Amino acid sequence: MRASATIRARRSRLRAGSGPLLAGACLALSALGIAPPVSAERYNNGFAQIPLDIQVEARRPPTCHEGPCNAMKHGRLTVNPQDGLIYWHGGDFGYAGPAGSDYPHFLHSARQEIFSYDIRTGEWRLVMPYCTPDNFTFGHPDQHGWVWDSRRGHFWALPGQQRYFGTDCDGLDKQVMGFDPQTGKWRLRKDQDPPPRTVEFAVYDAGTDKVYLLGPRGGNVLVWDPQTHEWEQLRGSMRSRRHAVYAALAGRSIYSVDFRNNSLIAFDIDRQRIRDVAPLPWDAPACPHPQAREWIYTLHLAHLEALLVYDWGCSKSAWLYWLEHEAWQPIDIGAADGRHLVYHPATEQILIMGDSGDYQHDFDNDDATPYIVRIKRR
């Protein structure tokens, strides 16, 4: 399926103070050889209209023993650039788990599996089972950090909202663990301190060799050092913010959405401070479901030098934010839907999958279809 994404410049729903958006839109129009509207400066609003070609492909959902199936939430997807595979870790998805006195009510919660996905062939594979020898595994990951360490060539799993249900296969609690995809084994440094608070999303920065942890509950940015395994809390860095669950590293900044203040925000890694980038082109605070406001996804599309911002929770709208032009552009991603997204830089594709969005989580009927989205300039 192919969707045209040439969008006419029009008045936006942005609040006052959106001058940078208009300036970006005018730059985009000029680059196309199109004169910006005469009244643009007066109205202080407008969207970019860069011609795009958007291709959307629906793929076969994984079975329950080769990948996350049925409804799913709270998992993490990260690309391993060495083998080109996407690795899924943790979260909630539906099929029976191990025995346990308290577990039957939570059969689908905080799974311990790791799966790989080949975006080129569509093949899923079980990499790490739920139960491991001596229960040496990262215990019940849910809303956790899952990052690729490009210096060391392995993944880090960082504690999130871990829950324990008394199963026969409980893993380790509140420990940062490394996972080597070549050996398929976990590694653990003993005598490490737990994080100061639970974390919901993590970004690894090779420049500083640090992991930066953010989450929708507000509070300060946490920094974890892979060399020393020590935590640092950057006080005041996210004061009064309510940022969404996904964040994206682009250059020296980590971008996310502050849904309380209706703003695209950026955390400057080197200066250790936050700034407002642009007002959102939809009214995020008006979302009637308090939890749904958190489900806004931000990805950095390196081949476009743009951010994909996807409001899965409420408006179901998708946007590009052009970093060069400082302008929003609405896009149509067709039937693609899901609360798990990852960008594959080698193929310049986006994987979107998981959950129908009714918040009832009907594990027998919810849609697990993976969608592959590719956005290119014309």
Image (cartoon, rainbow, N blue to C red):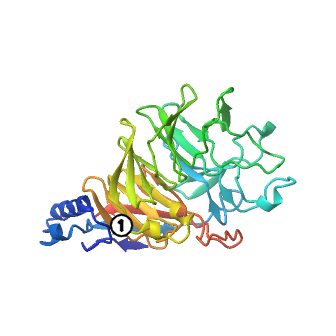
Q: Could you tell me which quadrant the N terminus lies in?
A: bottom left
Q: Nearer the viewer, residue 69 or 268?
A: 268
Q: Is residue 286 left or right of residue 46?
A: right
Question: Is residue 161 shown above or below 175?
Answer: below
- Seen at 67% across and 68% down, the residue is 361
- Seen at 33% across and 53% down, the residue is 277
Question: Is residue 26 shown above or below 242?
Answer: below
Q: Provide the secondary structure element on which disc 1 rests.
A: loop
**Res 261 seen here:** yes
x, y percent for residue 136: 75, 37
Question: Is residue 328 shown above or below 180?
Answer: below
Quadrant of res 74: bottom right
**Res 303 seen here:** no
Q: Nearer the viewer, residue 65 or 107?
A: 107
x, y percent for residue 7: 29, 72
Q: Residues within 10 Å of mark 1 (few under 14, many from 20)?
A: many
Quadrant of res 306: bottom left
Determine which residue is flagged by label 1: 281
- Seen at 14% across and 65% down, the residue is 33
Q: Could you tell me which quadrant the C terminus lies in?
A: bottom left
Q: Nearer the viewer, residue 295 or 279?
A: 279
x, y percent for residue 257: 43, 56
Q: Is residue 157 left or right of residue 232?
A: right
